[in-house]
Image (cartoon, rainbow, N blue to C red):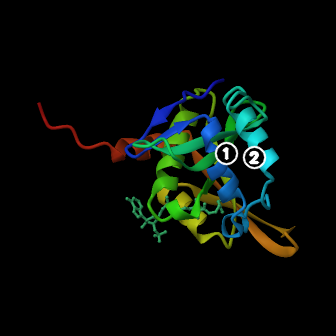
Amino acid sequence: MVLALPARTKRLVLRRFEPQDVEIFFGYRNDPAVARLQSWDGISRTAALQFVRVQGAVQAAAPGEWFQIALALAHSNQLVGDVGVCIGKDGRAAELGFTLARAHQKSGYAAEGVRCTVDLLFGVPAIGRVTAVTDARNLSARKLLDRLGFQNTATTHRLFKGAQCAEHTFEIKRAKWRGLAASRQPARPPN
Ligand SMILES: CC(C)(COP(=O)(O)OP(=O)(O)OC[C@H]1O[C@@H](n2cnc3c(N)ncnc32)[C@H](O)[C@@H]1OP(=O)(O)O)[C@@H](O)C(=O)NCCC(=O)NCCS
């Protein structure tokens, strides 16, 4: 089960992490505004180096393991963020998470990268469902998932970074994604 990388969208290339990504990755992973509603709280330079080295080399999306796809600008190859994917051990569902450096937010890049990632995941025949878990306070993430057609299917409550919070699980199934993808295609002119 290997994701077909690199992949291109209109403005981005989705690829493996590369050595020159370390500084930008280190920068946004240590931005408190970016980390606020994420499971992590910053990263050391050594850990960032190790992360980029490992993610650049491991199998793309081995079941049960998180794999991080780098999102880079197509025209410059500059890193702007990443999408993490984890295909379940039985290979039938995948979870994703996404992060964008602050300077590149509010440009539609995250949605573009996540849309392409979901296309790649549903390119794996066994995968029938893609999910994403987000903090209820994360309006940007909720809007993104909503716009792409994901539905909130469950809400749980837990202690997160010292505060009680609600977490939404968003989900989209293969048939719905395929239907939405078909409706996004421009209509073919009649013969
Ligand atoms: C969650 C996160 C990735 C969303 O990033 P984002 O840039 O807001 O998301 P999108 O790519 O969907 O961009 C949509 C915004 O870009 C704007 N935009 C500007 N130009 C655009 C274009 N050409 N195409 C599409 N949208 C565009 C849209 O109007 C929209 O703004 P709005 O949300 O104010 O309505 C980002 O906030 C982030 O990295 N947060 C920190 C990490 C995090 O919490 N991740 C989620 C974990 S599940």
Quarter-of-image position of residue 187: top left
Q: Nearer the viewer, residue 77 or 95?
A: 77
Bin the neighbour count of mark 1 within 10 Å (Cα to Cα): few under 14, some 14-19, many 20 and up. Answer: many
Residue 174 percent across, percent down from the top left: 54, 39
| Residue underneath mark 1 | 22
Q: Amino acid at mark 1?
A: Val
Q: Residue at x 42, y 47 (%)?
A: 180
Quadrant housing the C terminus: top left
Kindly identify which numbered label has been placed on residue 38: none
- Tell whether circle 1 marks a residue whose Cβ is less than 8 angstroms from ligand 1: no
When the figure is inspected, residue 6 is found, relative to residue 101, above or below; the finding is above
| Residue underneath mark 2 | 48
Q: Amino acid at mark 2?
A: Ala
Q: Residue at x 67, y 32 (%)?
A: 56
Residue 49 percent across, percent down from the top left: 75, 42
Q: Nearer the viewer, residue 26 or 64?
A: 26
Tell me if label 2 and label 1 are in contact, CB under 8 Å: yes
Query: Horizontal placement of 181 versus 118: left or right?
Result: left
Query: Circle 2 — which element?
Result: helix
- Would residue 17 be visible to someone looking at this image? no
Residue 170 percent across, percent down from the top left: 64, 56
